[in-house]
Amino acid sequence: MTPAIIIFPGINRERDMAIALEATFGTKPRMLWHKDTDLTGIDLVVIPGGFSFGDYLRCGAMAAQSPIMRAVKAHAERGGYILGVCNGFQILAEAGILPGALLRNASLRFLSMDCHLRVERADTVFANRYQKGQTFRAVMAHGDGNYFADDATLDRLEDENRVAFRYATPAGDATPDVNLNGSARSIAGIYSQNLRVLGLMPHPEDLVDPLMGGNDGKPLFEALAAA
């Protein structure tokens, strides 16, 4: 699988993502500026975290209108793989590639801390190196990570088994006290209908080496590399 990372003005997590991808894929990912439109030869599109266009209007709203997003939408429609982390998730939601929206955290404060995610399904190309129900540590760093959708959309995500991860205790309990941003039903990440697009708020790329403090996020990238 050949990966590429999209860079928008204000994105600042592309190097962290590149380190994670290179460590598991064994090759440097292509770095694509947001005005590029050629995804030829790319299997996996990664949209990293940061503050695209300064998060003006709404987080991800301006980036969703960038020229490359037309190519990203076409990539999704033909079954290509996409990973959007933090601002990347916000951009995918604003572009209509994933349902719902990311609102201000319930505390109205930027959250920067570790959290634990519970794996809701382990039969996807992103999560097959984890076990269903397993928890792993990830890094939360966002001000607008409060996932919101109407009840009909949330019910559909549940019925179609498209919730990827939920905020949980280390023991795996999705209790309100660990859902710090207030996301609906403790949702931390969701899949597209064909399970080839994943958006999640916490940063698995921040934990891919013991020197980073752990490698809890590495299985996600190993799974993609092996696909």
Image (spheres, rainbow, N blue to C red):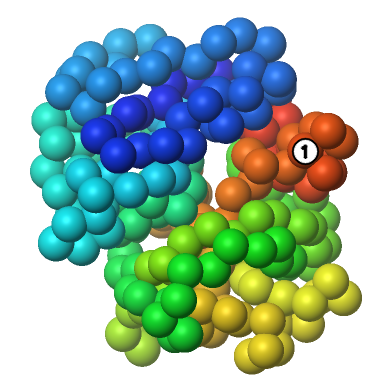
Relative side of 130 to 93, left or right: right
Q: Is residue 153 left or right of residue 171?
A: left
* Residue 50 occupies quadrant: top left
Residue 174 relative to residue 147: left or right: right
Quadrant assignment, res 56: bottom left
The residue under label 1 is which amino acid type?
Answer: Met
Q: Position of residue 33 (x, y in %)?
A: 26, 21
Q: Position of residue 144 (x, y in %)?
A: 38, 68
Q: Residue at x 19, y 18 (%)?
A: 36
- Which one is in front, 64 or 41? 64
Quadrant in which the C terminus appears: top right
**Percent from the top left, x then y, of residue 193?**
41, 56
Q: Is residue 159 above or below residue 78?
A: below
Relative to 160, residue 129 above or below? above
Residue bearing mark 1: 212
- Element at label 1: helix
Residue 176 appears in view:
yes
Give percent across and percent down for residue 210: 86, 36
Residue at (42, 67) in percent of width and height: 143
> Along the line of sight, which residue is nearer the eye, 144 or 77?
144
Q: Quadrant of residue 197?
A: top left
Q: Residue at x 15, y 48 (%)?
A: 62
Residue 113, compared with residue 221, is above or below; it is below
